[in-house]
Image: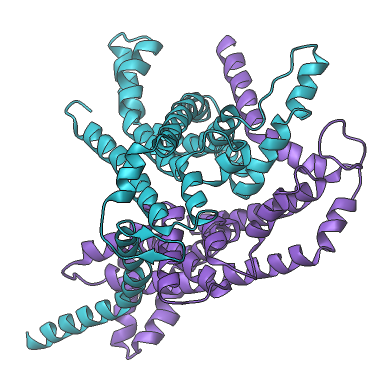
């Protein structure tokens, strides 16, 4: 008995010892910097650095300066548009791969659909700026067919296209995963009870895959709203997004307190989206 | 029949959308002219040559490689040890530890980078490739932990206990029993970490000063506008990432 206890205590000590490095690393290089950033967001920037007077001035500035609040609204608008568009494009694609493509080619079809996912994201945005530029490929085709040219580069549309491209790939993966998990019996049962294909989709398949879609949509929201590169390369410097505003504070204005406050706002937005999703998932009947 | 036609058309359109930028990127990296826009004037390797003879780019490529290997090795070590520690003992607070270790996965890289930048500033730590590596460990250790943890299970536990009963020390158990048993997961975790580090921009941008990684160098290259040389380096970077991901996928599939 005492020997067994001794082994268990030793097991536990060993487990703690093994976990300690990762825990300490996380505390020192993740939790601590984050706490520090939260503190700095309450300080003020001066010409030479920061003064440690505690106030909510940076947050007040966020809510009162139109440029700051506007950037947050831009980010939310872009992110919501991208999330909705990506889900709408990805769902049918995932459906076709899961239902229409023969089983042994499904993996290939999926892999193909996500290969460009692995291009460097800077390169991917640059590639879209090539495609959409005034003399780019899209306008070249349009001209070839005698259609009017589009002025897409350096605009919100370009940002939305660039993002939608990336997140469509991500969502095809996640939605496919929730589609193949559906037991086929459920659909057969619905069909036996007289439901047509549309009714089966509406009342069986869609409700059962919606949680997976929501998780993917949340992931899209969180990654999209925090990205600096895509709006910076494709947006043309108009209607800044929140991360661009953060980087502007870090760079040109050397205002670390304001950059920290804006980052906290960014995190708050992601947290709100998360809570909304969690609450939706808990609702009865879902 | 109509249903098949609609499905096939939709698939083709989505594939076209997904591959359009990659196609344009790679095609115009071979452009025989000064601009990576239509018309395609013919096949030339001069931009690829320009990339290979560009000292800055090649130095950045080397830096990226070193940062990726170093940060992935440290991440894998931290993640593997923690996954093993938490897999095999009923610790009080194991859930909290798990949550804490994986927490960085849910925070935007911009916020992680900014927090580290502020900390290094206050602690007077000079920015270098070391600080970039450190930042990449913060984002990759949780990933390695998650992959390792999901690969560990009852078979390892039993084999480890047997090895211990036969007198093997802790380090030998880990090196000779646990690690070989979950080798595919270790390889996949390492390769995925490599690709994430290799591609990562914002943390590397915030935490580097004189020596920069490839994405940061690419970023400054973009300021010169549309240029087939950027296409060439972009195509090469894509090739490396795609290769690493394919290798990771193969490593994981062999387990299945």
Query: In the image, is B89 to the left or to the right of A75?
Result: left
* Residue at the image position 33 percent from the left and 29 percent from the top: A210
Q: Is residue A277 above or below residue A14?
A: above
Which quadrant is home to the N terminus of chain A?
bottom left
Does B240 sit left or right of B255 as displayed? right
Position above or below: A9 against B222 = below
Horizontal and vertical percent for residue A74? 45, 32
Toward which corner of the image does residue B139 lie, by quadrant?
Answer: bottom left
Residue A50 seen: yes
Location of residue B131 in the rendering, given as x and y in whole percent from the top left corner:
51, 72
Report which colour depicts chain A.
cyan
The image shows residue A193, relative to residue B166, as above or below, that is above
Residue A32 x %, y %: 32, 68
Residue drawn where x is 84% and y is 40% of the image: B35
The image quadrant where one finds the C terminus of chain A is top left
Q: Across the whole image, how many numbered discs are drawn on residues?
A: 0
**What residue do we see at 49% from left, 65% from top?**
B136
Question: Which chain corresponds to the colour purple?
Answer: B
A277 to the left or right of A283: right
- Nearest the camera: A179 or A33? A33
Q: Position of residue B193 (x, y in %)?
A: 52, 62
């Amino acid at each position: 008995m005492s020997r067994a206890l001794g082994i268990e205590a030793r097991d536990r000590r060993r487990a703690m010892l093994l976990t300690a490095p990762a825990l300490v690393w996380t505390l020192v290089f993740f939790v601590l910097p984050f706490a520090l950033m939260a503190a700095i967001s309450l300080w003020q920037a001066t010409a030479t650095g920061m003064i440690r007077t505690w106030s909510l001035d940076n947050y007040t500035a966020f809510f009162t300066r139109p440029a700051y609040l506007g950037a947050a609204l831009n980010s939310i608008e872009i992110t919501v548009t991208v999330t909705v568009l990506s889900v709408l494009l990805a769902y049918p694609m995932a459906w076709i791969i899961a239902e229409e493509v023969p089983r042994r080619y499904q993996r290939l079809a999926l892999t193909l659909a996500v290969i460009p996912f692995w291009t460097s994201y800077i390169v991917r945005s640059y590639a879209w700026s090539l495609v959409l530029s005034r003399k780019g490929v899209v306008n070249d085709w349009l001209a070839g067919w005698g259609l009017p040219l589009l002025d897409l580069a350096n605009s919100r549309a370009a940002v939305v296209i660039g993002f939608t491209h990336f997140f469509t790939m991500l969502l095809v993966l996640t939605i496919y995963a929730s589609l193949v998990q559906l037991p086929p019996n459920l659909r057969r049962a619905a069909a036996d009870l007289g439901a047509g294909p549309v009714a089966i989709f509406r009342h069986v398949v869609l409700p059962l895959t919606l949680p997976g879609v929501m998780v993917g949509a949340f992931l899209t929201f969180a990654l999209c709203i925090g990205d600096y590169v895509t709006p910076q390369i494709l947006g043309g410097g108009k209607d800044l997004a929140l991360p661009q505003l953060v980087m502007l504070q870090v760079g040109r204005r050397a205002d670390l307190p304001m950059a920290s406050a804006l980052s906290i706002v960014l995190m708050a937005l992601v947290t709100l989206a998360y809570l909304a999703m969690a609450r939706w998932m808990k609702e009865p009947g879902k | 029949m109509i249903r098949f036609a609609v499905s096939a058309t939709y698939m083709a359109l989505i594939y076209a959308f997904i591959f359009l930028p990659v196609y344009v990127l790679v095609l115009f990296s071979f452009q025989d002219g000064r601009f990576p826009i239509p018309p395609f004037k013919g096949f030339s390797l001069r931009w690829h040559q320009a990339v290979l003879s560009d000292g800055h780019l090649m130095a950045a490529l080397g830096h990226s490689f070193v940062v990726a290997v170093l940060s992935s090795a440290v991440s894998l070590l931290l993640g593997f040890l923690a996954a093993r520690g938490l897999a095999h003992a009923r610790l009080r607070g194991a859930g909290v530890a798990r949550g804490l270790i994986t927490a960085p996965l849910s925070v935007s890289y911009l916020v992680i980078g900014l927090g580290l930048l502020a900390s290094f500033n206050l602690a007077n730590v000079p920015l270098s490739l070391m600080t970039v590596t450190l930042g990449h460990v913060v984002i990759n250790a949780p990933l390695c932990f998650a992959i390792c943890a999901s690969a560990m299970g009852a078979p390892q536990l039993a084999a480890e206990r047997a090895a211990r009963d036969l007198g093997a020390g802790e380090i030998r158990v880990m090196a000779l029993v646990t690690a070989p048993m979950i080798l595919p997961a270790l390889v996949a975790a390492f390769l995925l970490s490599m690709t994430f580090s290799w591609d990562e921009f914002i943390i590397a941008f915030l935490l580097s000063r004189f020596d920069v990684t490839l994405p940061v160098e690419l970023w400054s290259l973009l300021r010169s506008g549309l240029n087939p040389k950027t296409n060439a380096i972009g195509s090469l970077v894509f090739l490396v990432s795609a290769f690493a991901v394919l290798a990771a996928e193969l490593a994981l599939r062999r387990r299945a």
